[in-house]
Amino acid sequence: MEKLTAAGAKVDAKDFLALAEEAGSSKAVNIALMGRFSTYFPDITDEQWQDAIEKNVPAKFLELNRKAFELGRNA
């Protein structure tokens, strides 16, 4: 990462697997990553992100995925 930083690249390294596990399941790692990814798109509202999650995640996993998203967003 040192070479990337020296070249002017922004490095955003986090342990998203650990965040997904904290949310309740390692399978939510993609949603934790999406939470972090969402911080790069300020024009997309939190409501829009939440709506996308709700439309694509089975109801029984919705709360887990919402938690994973928030943990990733705040990482």
Image (cartoon, rainbow, N blue to C red):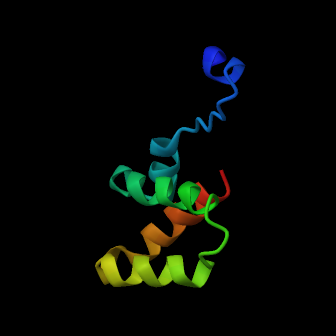
Whether 30 is drawn above or below 6: the answer is below
What residue appears at the point 67 percent right and 21 percent down from the top-left corner?
Answer: 7
Question: At which x and y percent is residue 35?
Answer: 54, 61
Whether 41 is drawn above or below 49: the answer is above
Quadrant the N terminus occupies: top right
What residue appears at the point 43 percent right and 58 percent down from the top-left corner?
Answer: 24
Quarter-of-image position of residue 60: bottom left
Question: At which x and y percent is residue 63?
Answer: 46, 75
What residue appears at the point 70 percent right and 27 percent down from the top-left corner?
Answer: 8
Whether 34 is drawn above or below 48: the answer is above
Question: At which x and y percent is residue 26?
Answer: 37, 49
**Which is nearer the eye, 32 or 24?**
32
Query: Furthest residue to the front?
Result: 7
Number of marks in picture: 0
45 vs 27, left or right, is right
Question: At which x and y percent is residue 31?
Answer: 43, 60
Quarter-of-image position of residue 44: bottom right
Query: Furthest residue to the top?
Result: 3
Query: Furthest residue to the left?
Result: 58
What residue appears at the point 42 percent right and 79 percent down from the top-left corner?
Answer: 52
